Image (tube, rainbow, N blue to C red):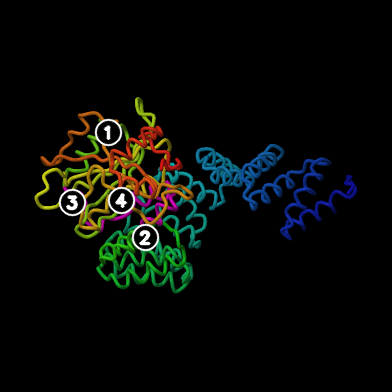
């Protein structure tokens, strides 16, 4: 298609129509051809909107900046630039763009509201609240803006004020389900669970597929001790979002309290198998402890010892204690000076004595488990979690040369499906001398092995298998995809 000054406007209208019809590829091609004839600001803007729709945020930002270069007095384009920066998590630049938009036209409540979101991401809640209040003053009848302001008040721990604003938002739009959900969260934090249940019910009446409301309704029932209703709502939530880690964790907690340990383990293992660091970090940070935890002082003493000898840990995976069973943390320690490998170690298995046979003087009933890996490993956390609970679920104990068979593969296509417990291999004496309340703690290294290796060990003994490993140069740093030596 030939484009010239005479037919420019009609072809521009065609491009706009293509955009309206969601024919984005054709619209982009036509807009670019039009730009080669005449660099009109609206074309850059339309391209930016299309790129945003397609999730191509960097390209959208580039287009909006081109618009701003040609038309620097456009408040609208700086608003869009701010939105792009926010999507890219460049919150400081987003705030500057919103400020520029408001400098050119201070009447856009959504610029204030979006700037408030950016301030919140930077943990500057007081600045966020100022922006929310300005947005609300410009559009006091907007239920969404009112609800956002209430959320910020809630985060500032101004819960009574937040409740007033939530109620105002609900009056402005009684069919806005989110406000009842957030109001329910606020009421739960104030331990007003019965009223929270009523407000979650209002959210679910408006939106039966509101998964977060289903989940938090389960939390509220859990907290008042109505476990049957809690289970019903957690299961509804899981049916809506099968792999949501928070839902799985809550459901696992409940199954633990109910004594349904197999179901609890299934939930926790599903979290580990579908692991996402950011989600799990938030889950760990925000969840309530509903089950027995470590004896007082144990965590501080243990973590001080781990940091001294193993190094700073990058994260801790918290599990939920089963009734009368230990609460187990899993520490992830990245490579440090002098330690080129990743270290995964349990904390809490030794809080409770394993069921050692009466008359056995050679077995230490207080143990922790350790795995060395060459890289950050989801499977290592999963294996430690299952191994740490194994003796308590089976009324037994683990010691040097113990083996455990699993009913799952550690990694897809890996031959390693079982575990052999050995000495720690690399830790110095000071680390191994650790005690809690006068109880000597035994540290056992976990070495994944194959079914054939397990069979060989059972027939010929641990020493014979270790000789095979030595001949094949099997390292203490686990290669989970290694081939079986048998």
Percent of width and height locating residue 364: 16, 44
Q: Secondary structure at mark 1?
A: helix
- Residue under numbered circle 3: 354
* On-image quarter of the C terminus: top left
Q: Are marks 4 and 3 in contact (CB under 8 Å)?
A: no
The magenta stretch is 268-295
- Residue under numbered circle 1: 307
- Residue under numbered circle 2: 266
Nearer to us: label 2 or label 4: 4
Q: Cα distance, mark 1 to mark 3?
A: 26 Å
- Image vertical order of residue 318 relative to residue 338, above or below: below
Q: Are marks 4 and 1 in contact (CB under 8 Å)?
A: no
Quarter of the rendering containing residue 94: top right
Percent of width and height locating residue 192: 28, 65
Q: Secondary structure at mark 3?
A: loop
Query: Could you classify mark 1 by the number of other residues whose Cα lies within 10 Å: few (under 14), some (14-19), or many (20 or more)?
Result: few
Q: Cα distance, mark 2 to mark 3?
A: 23 Å
Tell which circle, 4 or 3, labels the residue nearer the N-terminal end.
3
Residue 280 lies in the magenta-colored region: yes
Q: Cα distance, mark 4 to mark 1?
A: 29 Å
Q: Cα distance, mark 4 to mark 3?
A: 15 Å
Tell which circle, 1 or 2, labels the residue nearer the N-terminal end.
2
């Amino acid at each position: 298609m030939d484009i010239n000054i005479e037919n420019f406007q009609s072809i521009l209208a065609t491009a706009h129509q293509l955009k309206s019809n969601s024919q984005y590829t054709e619209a982009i091609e036509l807009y670019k051809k039009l730009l080669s004839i005449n660099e009109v600001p609206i074309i850059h803007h339309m391209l930016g909107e299309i790129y945003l729709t397609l999730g191509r945020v960097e390209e959208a930002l580039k287009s909006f900046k081109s618009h701003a270069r040609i038309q620097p007095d456009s408040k609208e384009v700086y608003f869009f630039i701010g939105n792009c920066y926010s999507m890219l998590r460049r919150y400081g630049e987003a705030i500057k763009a919103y400020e520029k938009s408001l400098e050119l036209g201070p009447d856009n409540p959504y610029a204030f509201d979006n700037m408030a979101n950016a301030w919140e991401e930077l943990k500057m809640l007081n600045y966020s609240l100022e922006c929310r209040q300005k947005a609300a003053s410009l559009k006091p009848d907007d239920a969404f803006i009112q609800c956002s302001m209430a959320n910020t008040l809630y985060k500032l721990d101004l819960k009574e004020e937040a409740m007033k604003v939530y109620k105002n938002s609900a009056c402005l739009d009684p069919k806005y389900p989110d406000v009842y959900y957030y109001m329910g969260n606020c009421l739960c934090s104030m331990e007003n669970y019965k009223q929270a249940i009523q407000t979650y019910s209002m959210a679910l009446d408006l939106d039966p597929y509101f998964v977060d409301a289903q989940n938090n309704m389960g939390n509220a029932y859990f907290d008042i001790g109505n476990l049957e209703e809690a289970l019903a709502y957690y299961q509804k939530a899981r049916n809506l979002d099968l792999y949501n880690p928070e839902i799985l964790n809550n459901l696992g907690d409940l199954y633990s309290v109910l004594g349904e340990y197999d179901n609890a383990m299934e939930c926790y293992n599903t979290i580990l198998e579908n692991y996402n660091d950011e989600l799990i970090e938030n889950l760990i940070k925000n969840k309530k402890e509903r089950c027995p935890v470590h004896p007082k002082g144990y965590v501080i003493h243990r973590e001080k010892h781990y940091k001294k000898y193993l190094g700073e840990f990058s994260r801790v995976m918290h599990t939920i204690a089963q009734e009368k069973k230990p609460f187990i943390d899993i520490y992830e320690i990245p490579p440090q000076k002098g330690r080129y490998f990743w270290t995964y170690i349990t904390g809490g298995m030794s809080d409770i004595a394993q069921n050692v046979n009466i008359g056995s003087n050679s077995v230490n009933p207080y143990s922790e488990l350790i795995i060395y890996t060459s890289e950050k490993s989801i499977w290592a956390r999963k294996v430690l979690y299952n191994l740490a609970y194994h003796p308590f679920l089976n009324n037994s104990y683990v010691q040097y040369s113990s083996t455990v068979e699993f009913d799952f593969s550690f990694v897809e296509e890996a031959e390693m499906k079982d575990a052999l417990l050995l000495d720690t291999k690399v830790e110095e004496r000071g680390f191994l001398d650790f005690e809690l309340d006068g109880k000597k703690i035994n540290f056992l290294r976990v070495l994944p092995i194959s079914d054939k290796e397990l069979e060989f060990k059972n027939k010929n003994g641990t020493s014979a298998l270790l000789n095979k490993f030595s001949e094949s140069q099997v390292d203490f740093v686990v290669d989970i995809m290694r081939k079986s030596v048998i």
